[in-house]
Image (tube, helix red, strand yellow):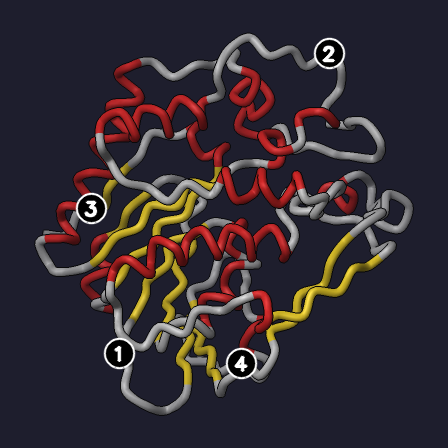
């Protein structure tokens, strides 16, 4: 969807109507989400595994002023409904929205004009909010990044993102007017192994293909904290930050709201982070049970 001032917006999974409140979730659907998240959390807790639910807002939620004038809000979005319901019923989650709104108020470009996703700076602000919750868990050997650990470089003009490329390869015309490059300083020794075939990447932090599972290991020492990340494409910019934060990070793609207990049994993590983007509230949560 073409918005104002060069902004493009993703519309799959009926996201526009989800966002403007035209497709509200029923109480039954909200209860399904709550029960799905709760059952997975309790299953993990019985095995002494920590759990953090990470609902991620779409760009529409942060930059509605750039959407076309014909988009009229008629009620709360599915994202707001779900977060409010989880809060009211006491089901924990990581709320990154205040941190992203604060970053926007500081004129930080946290989502990209021509791309579906947030920028690496927006991802870092979400990482900070996530780590505020991680800090409460008492996990050993966690090396939290601060702003001083990352070099943020403003870029005046870069080729357009995924939505520009999908518009007849117009990324050379529909460009990003403002972007940011994020480079982690003083990178530790890091290996990235593709789980499907054992391939070891030469450039570990570049190996973030959407449909592949990766295992990141920091150094050759003891794994004090292992994390399993269920994720969709919004975690692309989170992975580098998380890979250098924990001794081990296992990344498992999940485009829909699905929990796979077999993966957890296989890798035996200390913490499971479940990230899903707002538009995934188009689907009912499912659990692939394995004992």
Q: CA distance from mark 1 to mark 2?
A: 52 Å
Left or right of residue 138, residue 161 in this image: right
Judge depth for marks 1 and 2 and give the one in front: 1
Residue matched to label 4: 201
Residue at 74% x, 34% y: name it: 8
Q: Earlier in the sequence, mark 1 or mark 2?
A: 2
Residue at 60% x, 22% y: name it: 16
Q: Earlier in the sequence, mark 4 or mark 2?
A: 2
Element marked by disc 3: helix
Left or right of residue 291, residue 32 in this image: right
Judge depth for marks 3 and 1 and give the one in front: 1
Q: CA distance from mark 3 to mark 1?
A: 21 Å
Residue at 75% x, 19% y: name it: 68
Judge by depth and name the residue closer to the eye, 13 or 218: 218
Residue matched to label 2: 70
* Residue contact between numbered discs 3 and 2, judged by CB atoms under 8 Å: no
Element marked by disc 1: loop
Left or right of residue 172, residue 44 in this image: left
Q: Earlier in the sequence, mark 4 or mark 1?
A: 4
Judge depth for marks 4 and 2 and give the one in front: 2
Give residue 41's mark.
3
Left or right of residue 36, residue 8 in this image: right
Residue at 65% x, 46% y: name it: 110
* Neighbours of disc 4 within 10 Å: few (<14), some (14-19), many (20+): some
């Amino acid at each position: 969807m073409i918005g104002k001032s060069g902004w493009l917006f993703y519309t799959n999974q009926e996201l526009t109507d989800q966002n403007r409140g035209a497709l509200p979730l029923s109480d039954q659907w909200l209860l399904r989400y709550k029960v799905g998240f709760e059952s997975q959390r309790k299953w993990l807790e019985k095995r002494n595994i920590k759990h953090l639910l990470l609902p991620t807002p779409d760009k529409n939620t942060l930059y509605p002023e750039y959407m076309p004038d014909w988009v009229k809000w008629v009620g709360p979005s599915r994202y707001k409904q779900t977060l409010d319901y989880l809060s009211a019923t006491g089901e924990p989650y990581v709320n990154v929205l205040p941190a992203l709104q604060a970053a926007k108020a500081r004129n930080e470009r946290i989502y990209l004009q021509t791309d579906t996703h947030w920028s690496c700076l927006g991802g870092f602000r979400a990482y900070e909010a996530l780590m505020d919750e991680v800090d409460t868990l008492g996990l050993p050997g966690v090396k939290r990044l601060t702003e001083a650990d990352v070099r943020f470089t403003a870029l005046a003009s870069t080729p357009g993102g995924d939505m520009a490329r999908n518009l007849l390869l117009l990324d050379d015309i529909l460009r990003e007017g403002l972007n940011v490059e994020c480079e982690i300083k003083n990178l530790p020794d890091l290996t990235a192994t593709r789980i499907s075939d054992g391939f070891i990447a030469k450039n570990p932090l570049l190996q973030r293909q959407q449909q592949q599972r990766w295992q990141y290991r920091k150094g050759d020492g003891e794994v004090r904290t292992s994390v399993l990340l269920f994720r969709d494409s919004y975690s692309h910019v989170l992975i580098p930050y998380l890979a250098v934060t924990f001794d081990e990070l296992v990344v498992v793609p999940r485009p829909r709201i699905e929990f796979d207990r077999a993966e957890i049994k296989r890798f035996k993590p200390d913490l499971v982070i479940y990230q899903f983007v707002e538009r995934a509230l188009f689907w009912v949560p499912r659990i692939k049970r394995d004992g």
